[in-house]
Amino acid sequence: KNLADSLEQWESSLRARESELHGDFESAISSIRQRCTEIISAFNADVSKATSEFKTETDKTLERLTVQNDKLAARVEELVSLREQIKKATSEIESVKGSLNEILKELKDSQDEQDASLEDLKQKVSEAKSNKSAKNTPTQPLPKSDSEKKSAANNQKTEPKTNSKKKQPDKREQQIRCFFGQNFKEEKYKQKKEQIIQAVLSSKTKQQVNCALQKTFPSEETSVIYKRLLPLFKSLPGQ
């Protein structure tokens, strides 16, 4: 009986201990669950905060990159435009260089023509002076026979009188011829050189020049020649 009582007491004690352990276990489980929930909540909050901050920084970085990319694109466009401008300026410089070379060549040709004209003029002046001095020097003619006198008289009747002095071109004509040599280098104009020069020499107004040219050249060609002659109307005297 005592043993049974002891066993019953021990059973009751075990049951009470089991209840206490069960309660402690439940309490520990609940505490662990609550702690895990708190840790998970804190972790999620930290992750959300970090994600938000990372997204914000990433957006700012992307925005700065976008701005810098736009600036870079603008600079590239400016460089392309500058390159085109430099290319165009280089082309214009080459064109001007070619024009200057052409002008220099024309000036040289004009200078050569002027030198030739001056040399020819000097020679003609020298010949005129020589002829004048020769005329002023009296010479004693030889006595002629009767037959020579009759022959000379007949020659005087039959031969027309000619002017021994050749007419020299005046300053205006020299200027016109020099101007023609500088501005009319095409063969088709050289063939009509005297007609063009005489059209200017014989005219006192621009209208007369135009009318004189139209008698020799078609309308389109007359317009081209007239435009080239325009500087001559201002530079020559008597216009």
Image: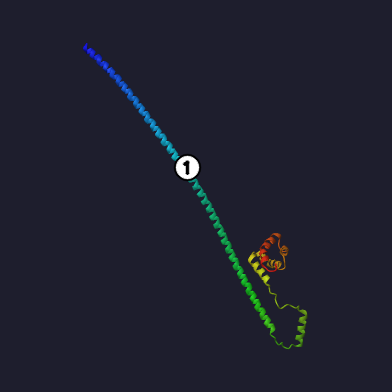
Residue at 25% across / 15% down in the picture?
9
Q: Nearer the viewer, residue 165 or 187?
A: 165
Answer with the quarter of the image where residue 58 lies. top left
Q: Amino acid at mark 1?
A: Glu
Answer with the quarter of the image where residue 178 lies. bottom right
Residue 137, position in %: x, y?
68, 85
Q: Nearer the viewer, residue 77 or 214?
A: 77
Quadrant of image for the C terminus: bottom right
Residue at 52% across / 51% down in the picture?
78
Answer with the quarter of the image where residue 126 lies. bottom right
Q: How is the image coloured?
A: rainbow
Image-based side of 232 in relation to 19, left or right? right
Residue 29, position in %: x, y?
34, 25
Q: Nearer the viewer, residue 147 or 75?
A: 75
Q: Dot 1 corresponds to which residue?
A: 63
Image-based side of 120 in relation to 85, left or right? right
Residue 205, position in %: x, y?
72, 65
Q: Is residue 64 above or below residue 138?
A: above
Residue 184, position in %: x, y?
65, 65
